[in-house]
Amino acid sequence: MKNLKIIWSFLCFSVPIAIGMAIPFATQAQNDSSFQFLKTIKGDFTYFNVDNLDNIYLITKNNQLKKLNVNGDSVAVFNDVKKYGNPDYVDVTNPLKSLLYYKNYSTVVVLDRLLTQRNTINLRKQNIFYVNSITLSYDNYMWLFDEEDFRLKKIDEEGKILQSSTDWRMLFDSVPAPVKIIDRDNYVYLYDPAKGFYIFDYYGGFKNRLAFLNWTNVEVNGTTVYGFEETKLYSYQLKSLQLKEYKLPAFFGKYISIKAMNGLVYLLNEKGVDIYQIK
């Protein structure tokens, strides 16, 4: 099957992620019956993200960041989205705290659960100039990958470096270029579409690799890894090693962006955000 690889374990010690010699095989789900339409959140949006409580974060054409709860009710609004241009990413790992990352300005805006601005971090003041992705850590600090010295770093709300991994040039023959960082359940996942997932512990120590290549819109949700490839959704169970493949149905139509989270698929299109349950 195209671009599906076996799990590649680099180290020989035990970690609480199902690894080893087992070969994950993809089970083909039924096409249209695999997705049940739930509802549409109508509006003119340019960006969205979803946290682990099913709160939805939307950037409107009027440059507002809105937070909606699971029932679709508005609970917060942030109006100063374009202070540094368009944010490259809105991290909602923690429902109590959000990050707006502006890559061109090396700037992070930190918001609380009601989208009130708490502070702004200029990474350049810490001599960090090239960062593609940033995310909240389990302890409310932040992870980032410094593209200049090839290290995974944790920083506090002032931008001070709290810890740093080994230089990746000493770990890998070919240095990954991660486009997404995810902190989930005692591990940090960094995804490079050309090389797959690289998994680290909370001390920055390398643990394992999952060689799922050319995926987009990746997410780690509990023990499930999600990713898309062209017209397919993949769902991989870290414990059972089971990989499922879903063909995206024609009725999804043309969409601006797509995300899988909490057993749901969210589609951003011209009329709003469509939500489907994965069966």
Image: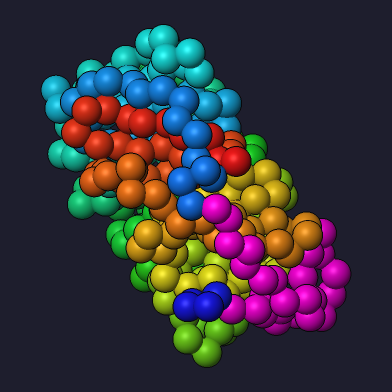
Horizontal arrangement in the rendering, residue 107 relative to residue 63 (left or right):
right
Image-based side of 77 in relation to 167, left or right:
left
- Look at the picture and state if 177 lies above or below 47: below
Position in image of residue 53 (x %, y %): 57, 26
* Rendered residue at 35%/23% (across/down): 40
Q: Please tell me whether residue 24 belongs to the stretch shown in magenta.
A: yes
Q: Indicate yes or no whether the magenta region holds residue 16.
A: yes
Q: Is residue 10 visible?
A: yes
Residue 202 visible in the displayed image:
no
Where does the magenta region start and end? 5-30
- Residue at point 38% right, 68% down? 147
- Residue 162 percent location from the top left of the image: 57, 50
Instruction: In the rendered view, tell whether residue 272 sits above or below residue 267.
Output: above
Counting from the top left corner in percent of width and height, residue 28 is at 58, 62
Up the image or down, 268 lies above or below 119; here it is below
Q: Is residue 148 above or below residue 30?
A: below
Specify whether 85 is left or right of 103: left
